[in-house]
Structures are given as C-alpha cells and as structure tokens.
Amino acid sequence: MERLIERARDALSDSYAPYSEYRVGAAIRTADGTVFTGCNIENANYSNSVHAEELAISKAVQAGHRAFDAIAVASSERDGVTPCGMCRQTLAEFCGDDLAIHCDEGDEHSTYTLGELLPNTITAAHLDR
C-alpha cells in the first residue's frame, strides 16, 4: 500500500493545475498487480478538467484491464483527499464495493472502501428497470 501511495505522489509532478494550484495524483492497481497512474489536468472551463482518478482508470481500461483491487490518491497538500463523487461513480463502473481507497495524509493515510464512500451506487442494473 505504501508503494501505491508513492506512485500517486509521483504522479503529482505531471499535474497541470494553474487555476486551483491543487495538484492531485492517483495510482490504481489492477487485480494482476499492474499499476496505472493519473494526475489532474485543469482547464479554464473547470467542467472540462480531468481528474487524476479518472485518468488512471481510463488508462487501465484502455489497456484492457477490468478488475481492480486498490487505488491511492494524493494531493500536493497531503490532506487525505478522497475521490469526488464523479470519480467514485466512474470507479463503481469497474470496481466492487470492496475496492480499497487509500488517501494520503503525509506520514499517515486513511483507507476506505468504495462502498463506504459511495453507498447505493448507480449500476448498469438500474438501466434495465
């Protein structure tokens, strides 16, 4: 888990955050142990910004992965940032409620499950109704 947080911290260096100056990095681990990273990429039109978690899972899915066991998220502030609601929903598309989410707090970290952070998730089953 420490290595996953380090990978998320490493991804911070690629962040493009000229507006908020709040850099975020993420590292998601696939079921086979492969790690993909992402960083936030801001846009002057904030709604077009890309979130670190979203970029990391997109890269993994593009590479053919569909099973994940953990993600780590780090910010330049080391403030224990958790994935936002949009990123939680994106994670829920590919991950179960038991996905471990490690949030960097500097010398320590908090760990949650996706189910804790996003109860009553919208799933493909809801579309069949």
Image (cartoon, rainbow, N blue to C red):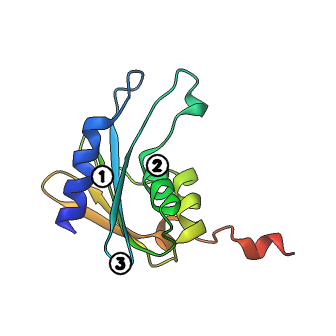
Q: Which amino acid type corresponds to the residue marked 3 in the rendered image? A: Asp
Q: Which residue is mark 3?
A: 32
Count residues near mark 2 (Cα–Cα under 10 Å), then give few for <14, some for 14-19, many for 20+: many
User: Which corner quadrant holds the C terminus?
Assistant: bottom right
**x, y percent for residue 54:** 49, 51
Q: Which residue is mark 1?
A: 80
Q: Report the residue at 42% width, 21% height from top.
A: 19
Callouts 2 and 1 close, C-beta under 8 Å:
no
Precedes in sequence: disc 3 or disc 1: 3
Count residues near mark 3 (Cα–Cα under 10 Å), then give few for <14, some for 14-19, many for 20+: few
Precedes in sequence: disc 2 or disc 1: 2
Q: Left or right? Give the position of 83 relative to 9.
A: right
| Residue 12 sits in quarter | top left
**x, y percent for residue 100:** 37, 72
User: Which corner quadrant holds the N terminus?
Assistant: bottom left
Residue 26, numbered label: none
Please tell me whether residue 112 is drawn above or below residue 98 in the rendered image.
above
Q: Secondary structure at mark 2?
A: helix
Please tell me whether residue 76 is drawn above or below residue 46 in the rendered image.
below
Q: Which amino acid type corresponds to the residue marked 1 in the rendered image? A: Gly
Residue nearest the observer in this picture, 35 or 90? 35
Label 2 to label 1: alpha-carbon separation: 19 Å
